[in-house]
Amino acid sequence: MPFLHTWQLRAEFALRLSQMYGEEVPAYNTLVEVSSHVNQDFMDRHGSDAERLGTLERVTAERHGAIRVGSPQELASVARVFAAFGMHPVGFYDLRDASSSSVPVIATAFRPVDEDELAKNPFRVFTSLLATEDPRFFNEELQRELREFIDSRSLFPDGLLELADRATVGQGLDSDEAERLLHLATSVFQLSSEPVDDAWYRKLEAISAVAADIGGVSSTHINHLTPRVLDIDDLYQRMEDRGIKMIDAIQGPPRWNGPDVLLRQTSFRALDEERTFRFADGSEGQGKLRVRFGEVEQRGVALTRKGRDLYEEMNAEIDRRMTSGDSRSRVSETVWQEMLPGTDAELAAQDLAFYTYSSSASQGEVPDGASLAELVTAGTVELNPIVYEDFLPRSAAGIFQSNLREAGQRDDAQEGTLYDMDRLSEIIGLPIKDPVDLYRAQQDASLSELEKQLGVTLR
Ligand code: OOG
Ligand code: NI
């Protein structure tokens, strides 16, 4: 009986969610199809250079998903399920104050952490927790009602968590149990056909559509699944040509004349889906909800802390320069060309972005005391970008917002509740890793290897 290793479970989990989502949201299948054409064409245009940010095989299979849960207990359980697939909490996102948008959630991403695990299958899930304690959104009465409603539901069927724990400890499962784990874990994220309590849902919706989506129904669901492309501008145009209306802009960095940086994302809006509602008099009727949408992304090199600071400065500069009638993408492009070095070598030399290093030279071929930058310029050492595996708070808030019809309500006379990475770690029961530390460690390890190979200490 074959044994499925953690990464095989993860790859299969991503595949099954993808199949399920394609059946539920057919436009997703179109997105995947167009994405794979975009990637193939990009490969044809750029040859082997196209794979600098990941092999075509990895990029084609690559997805991220997004889910939302309502209580610390639910988040802790989700963490147990994801651990079985080798997905660990990385990064902390507070979307309550992300620029002009405000959504009552805090979040982390569950993803593989090791380089080789990422290479095998990088499936990640952006996981939001409703900030039910924040009095700016929920008054005391609503906080109590939300707690009661959420505590009385059970998202995880019997057996799932135990099976997940066994897979975590055993670093995999044999095939019968693997099948059961995959079936149960996928089902949790299927859209439920249970009637929605109209009064309760609408009450929450008046505060925040996201709160209604999370706390207004008795189950959870995956609300998007995102393929990765190598050229998002091309994808955007092709989707529009097919008559699928995308949101107005591509979120994150602009198209510019330099290396791909961080993460660019765009989406099509949530579509109306038929749902059954139960009304106060006990009767039931059909209605429509918009909860699921399609998103696509292009990934680039990860930035250092210094690089991220510069990125924020550039965003502020773009905001300053924008006057009415300006196109944000045009202003952004100008600011990027002015403020950010336009080559990998410069980004590396100024410690703005993360790279691994490789060389075909060996001991004795390089003088001691040479600088890394000199060796890169001389072509003795090659730079390979470390791909950004995480998310951007501003874009995430933008993705949430673009799917909401109403702005919602928020009482800014109240003091917000403090949530931070430590508090979220405590809730999950595992330390959340800092993404920048992971990239730095990967770069450092590669540098040490290189020094060993060349037998020198690099400046
Ligand atoms: C999550 C939105 C964030 C992304 O790609 O930035 C996200 C959600 O809608 O639940 O997925
Ligand atoms: Ni997303």
Image (cartoon, rainbow, N blue to C red):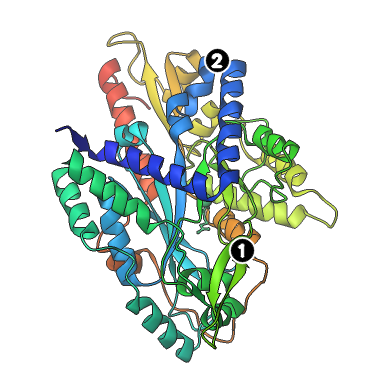
Residue at the extreme bottom of the image, as rendered: 141
Depth check: give the residue in front, 431 or 16. Answer: 16
Residue 29 visible in the shown view? yes
Amino acid identity at mark 2? Gly
Q: CA distance from mark 2 to mark 1?
A: 39 Å
Residue 454 coordinates in the image, percent (x, y): 30, 16
Instruction: Mark 2 or mark 1: name the one nearer the start of the chain.
Output: 2
Residue placed most toward the observer, 359 or 112: 112
Where is residue 298, by image quadrant?
top right
Residue 155's x, y, as percent? 34, 66
SS class of the residue under badge 2? Answer: helix
Asked if the residue under mark 1 is in contact with the one under mark 2, i.e. CB atoms within 8 Å, the reply is no
Q: Residue at x 53, y 19 (%)?
A: 49
Would you call the spot at circle 2 few (<14 residues within 10 Å), some (14-19), or many (20 or more)? few
Pick the residue in front: 245 or 365.
Answer: 245
What is the secondary structure assignment of the residue under circle 1? Answer: loop
Q: Residue furthest right?
A: 325
Quarter of the image for the C terminus: give it: top left
Q: Sort mark 1 into few (<14), some (14-19) or many (20+) by Cα contacts within 10 Å.
A: few
Please state if 7 lies on the left or on the right of 317 as rendered. left
Q: Quadrant of residue 43?
A: top right
Residue 243 drawn at (x, y percent):
74, 42
Up the image or down, 227 lies above or below 109; here it is above
Q: Nearer the viewer, mark 2 or mark 1?
A: 2
Which numbered marker is on residue 47? Answer: 2
Residue 433 appears in the figure: no
Residue 99: mark in rendering: 1
Q: Residue at x 32, y 29 (%)?
A: 446
